[in-house]
Amino acid sequence: MNQVAENIAFIREKITGAAKECGRDPGAVQLVAVSKRQDDDRIDAALAAGQRLFGENKVQEAQAHWQARRESYPDLRLHLIGPLQTNKVKDAVALFDCIETLDREKLALKLAEEMAAQGRDLPCFIQVNTGAELQKAGILPEYLGEFHDYCRYECGLDVQGLMCIPPADEPAALHFALLAKLAQEQGLLELSMGMSADFEKAIALGATYVRVGTALFGSRD
């Protein structure tokens, strides 16, 4: 538990240093602690260290991690950072505070309908497949403008930013720079990019959310 607290403090220092180095306000960069496949002790250690923003990949696992903890931590914020199936939208809207993986029209429409039904207006990020990888979710860059307009103006979703997961075998900075350019073109202010190995590069290129798991919690079970 002490190691998790130390890791969080270390990553926060790294975030502050990376932001200052490029002339940015460190407070403009938020740490998303990726708690997927982590055990309860590690999650509780992160909470005890003051971490309140967490990212989860799967709705069902997130429910197991967080439904009971919500009452104890009213300032808790949860981001969905994994692919969302339409049959899980109802549970996702009820549990999460932000959907980072909006990537297709069918999902956008379902999210809009469910948010209206539940009286929730969750911020959303569009996931962009910057590497055009067949096995990876996300809208292709050339379709982003049309998709953004559909989500915002036809579905009424609160699209606040973009998210990407760069290809593992390519320089991440190229994809971060592309995502920042795309966000600027769409007038979006938030960028969720950068993970344990490359979040400092992401901050230099404008990341407002960095998603860190292994560097905080250690290897996943």
Image (cartoon, helix red, strand yellow):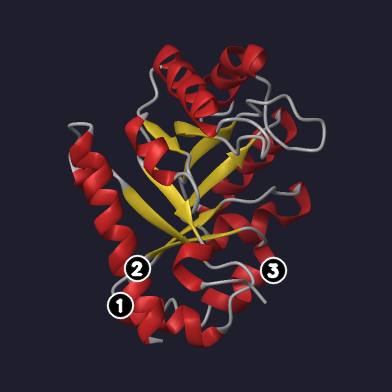
Question: Which residue is nearer to you in this view: 51 or 4?
Answer: 4
Q: Nearer the viewer, residue 77 or 21?
A: 21
Residue 23 falls in image quadrant: top left
**x and y percentages locating residue 121 in the rendered image:** 45, 45
Q: Given the image, on which type of amino acid does mark 2 rest?
A: Ile
Label 2 crowd bin: few (<14), some (14–19), many (20+), radius 10 Å: many
Q: Is residue 219 above or below residue 152?
A: below
User: Which residue position is annotated with label 3?
Assistant: 60
Q: Secondary structure at mark 3?
A: helix
| Residue 63 coordinates in the image, percent (x, y) | 61, 72
Mark 3 or mark 2, which is nearer the start of the sequence? 2
Q: Secondary structure at mark 1?
A: loop
What's the mark number on residue 49? 1
Residue plotted at (56% across, 61% down): 94
Residue 8's label in the rendered image is 2
Amino acid type assigned to the residue bearing label 1 in the image: Ala
* Residue visible at 66% across and 29% down in the picture: 129
Real-space CA distance between mark 1 and mark 3, rounded to the nearest whole angstrom: 25 Å
Question: Do labels 1 and 3 touch, CB within 8 Å?
Answer: no
Crowding at dot 1, Cα within 10 Å, few <14 / some 14-19 / many 20+, comes out as: some
Question: Which circle's residue, 1 or 3, is located before the other in the chain?
Answer: 1
